[in-house]
Every structure is written in C-alpha cells, then in structure tokens.
Amino acid sequence: MGLSTRAARAHASVDTVTAFFERMSGLADDPDALDFTFGNPHEMALPGLVDALRSNIEPQTFEWFAYKANEPPAQETVAAGLRDELGLDFEPADIAMTQGAFGAISLAFALVADAGDEVVIPTPGWFCYTPMLHAANLVPVEAPLDPETFDLDIAAVARAITPRTRIVVVNSPSNPTGRVFPKETWDHLAALLDEFSHRHGHRIWILSDEPYRRIRFDGIGFDSPAASYPWTMIDYSYGKVLLAPGQRLGYLALSPLLPRAERDELRESFMSLQLAIGWGFPNALMQYSVPALESVSIDIPELERKRDRLVSEMEAAGYRLTRPDGTFYLWGRAPGGDGAAFCDALSAQGVHFMPGTMFDQPAHFRISLTATMDTIERALPVITEAGTQPPA
Ligand code: PLP
C-alpha cells in the first residue's frame, strides 16, 4: 500500500470521474461522435485569445520568463473588473492570481482551514470539491440543494454545520444545474453563518466558486455573496469564458467588506501560501495577457440559442429539464429514472451525455452546450426518440 490515506480517499472519491474521462478520451478523434460530455471546446480557439498570447510571447526583457508571482498589472485589471461587475471596492492586493479556479480553490483551503476541518459542499455540485478536500486533509460534508429547483437549501446547510465547519462552498451559476442564486439567498446564508460563527466561537467562511459568473442568459443579473457576507473569498477562472480550460488562468479575491486587520493578514499571506502549495501562480504568458483577455468572451447569445433549441425540442419530447440561467450545461432527468443506463443507450447510438452518477445523482444527466449547433442538430433525432412522449 503506497498511497497515503488522504491520497487513497481522494482517488476513491473521484474514480468514477477519471474512469469516465478515460472512457470518453477518444471522442475528439472520432468524427462521428456527437459529444456533449465535458465543457471542452469543439471549435477553434477565440481569435482574441490567440492574439493576446501571440502579442506577449516575444520577450521584451531578459526577465520576461523569470519566476512570476502576483503580477501588479494582472491584479490591477482584475480588481478594476470586479469593482465594475460587483460594485464592491476591490483593491489589487485583494487578488491572488492562480492557475484557474482549481488553483484558487486550493489556495482558499490553505488560507483558512486546518487539517480535519469540515467544508460544506452543495450536491449536486462539481465533482472535484471532494477529492480536493481529501487531498488537503479536510472533510467534505454534503448539503443537498432543493431536489426539485436546485436552489440553495439554507436549512440543509444549517444541518450540515458542526463545530468543525470552517468553509461553506457555494457555486452560482451552478455546475451542473445552471441555476443562478439571488441576493436574498446570500442574505439568508450570511445570517445563518453569522449565527453559527458566534455559537461555535470561530468564523465560518464562504468560498464562492464563480468560474461561470460571466456566462449568463436572458440578461439575468448576478449577485455575489461577497456583497452580503464579509468573510467571503471568490474564486474565478478565465477557462470558461474563453473556453480554453487548458490555458490556466484565474484568481482568488477577498471580499472588500472584510474587517481591515483580517483583510491585511490574508493579503500578506497570499504570496507565501501560493509558494507553499507548489508555486500556485499562472505562467508568465497568461499573466501578461490578463488586460487583453478581460474583454474576450465566447459567444453567449449563441450558447443561449443552443440552450433554447435543446430545451424546446427535448421538453416537447417529454424530458424534464432545469432550464439553465447560466453556465454551459443543461441538467435533466433521465427518462426511466436510470441516468447511467440512459446515457449508455445513447452512447451506443453515438450521442454522448454525462451521467448524473458523476454528481451522485443517478436519475439525471448533464449535457454540455459547448457542442456545436451542427452536433445538436445531428443528435436531436436520437435524443428526442429516447425521450418519453408527452401525454396527448
Ligand atoms: N468550479 C466549477 C464549478 C467548475 O465547473 C470547474 C471546472 O469545470 C472549476 C471550478 C475549475 O475550473 P478551471 O478548470 O477553469 O480551474
């Protein structure tokens, strides 16, 4: 037995996901595969991304590719963007530049949690929270979302909190359901966490996982819990809005409402903790590109058209779906109630969905809207045929 206990736990908690990843890894090379599995690109990279990288690749000084930490122009751009988007007074020093949301989440765990602390995570939720918590020697505790609407269930969060709770993770727009939560949800959660923090004699943090923040539909607004609860850290990734998750870039941001002394202490710890978790900074090229990348985005109206096409055809065929407010995912109930069997049956016909088992929801499936419209049109006859017909 070579694996440490935490490595073994991390491995066991994500082996369904890694097995699925390996099983589906050939899809990109199969021209007949109609692939709706992971949120990966299916078209050539955005010209704005390629231009930004190209214009920064040529060294301008001998230090161009020296070690890079939190580079001030990147921090300044992010702070200005956040001030604009969230209406809060972010400063560059509130921002730690990271390798995507993954890196920011690891940093958040290292900043405020001690070994053995509990972290509340939403279910269904992103499948990497649990292995990341195990690898950090922390304990995941699930708080189910409302099973019908997938709203945050404040009573379920309350039941999940114990004297060992250190962080509550929230995710809006949510993977896999696409739900966006309103300010009232955050106000209720803030009141709850204030009460429990006082009762247990230590502060419970919110980690607001916001990689899909800029991918929203129907003109819907966005509220971050950072405006309702000062002890909030935001993690973000450019990998979603640029649809380039292999070019790692993101950040962790502290709520500007945090009391001054705590804000200073955390800011001052960024650099040493990023070093300690394994040089957790983005590569030089990505940091130089932040100012140019701030305004680059995938075509969100096109994503919305893909959502609308799938939702209207699939609902007419009898599917029960959660119409997403954001993200690039569509979440639904498998006809017959067995998500894995349903996805296997579709796979046999060349249409590949992600089974809900990846999110511990065996009755569901997830579709990625990053598939092209052409893929959608080719897949729809198979998808609608597999749905249950609505009553006449
Ligand atoms: N959080 C959620 C909810 C996600 O869906 C993902 C990626 O799928 C991440 C974090 C990690 O994002 P990145 O790979 O861009 O770091």
Image (tube, rainbow, N blue to C red):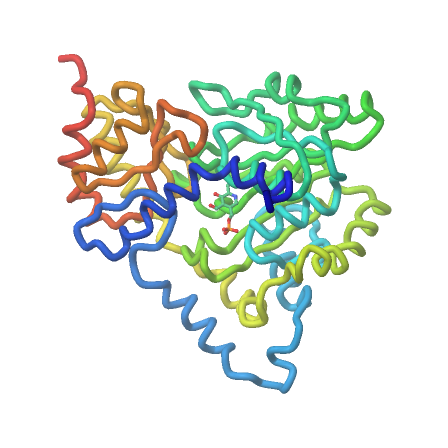
Q: Residue at x 79, y 32 (%)?
A: 203
User: Can you say which quadrant of the picture contains the N terminus?
Assistant: top right
Q: Is residue 272 above or below residue 125?
A: below
Residue 232: % across, % down: 69, 39
User: Can you say which quadrant of the picture contains the C terminus?
Assistant: top left
Residue 115: % across, % down: 74, 38
Please, which residue is most extreme toward the top here? 392
Q: Is residue 143 left or right of residue 30?
A: right
Q: Is residue 295 above or below residue 265?
A: below
Residue 226: % across, % down: 66, 40
Splitting the image into 4 quarters, where does residue 250 fall? bottom right
Q: Is residue 66 left or right of residue 236?
A: right
Q: Residue at x 59, y 31 (%)?
A: 121
Q: Residue at x 36, y 63 (%)?
A: 45
- Relative depth, front residue between 57 and 310: 57
Splitting the image into 4 quarters, where does residue 283 fall? bottom right
Total count of labels: 0
Please, which residue is most extreme toward the front here? 1
Residue 49: % across, % down: 43, 66
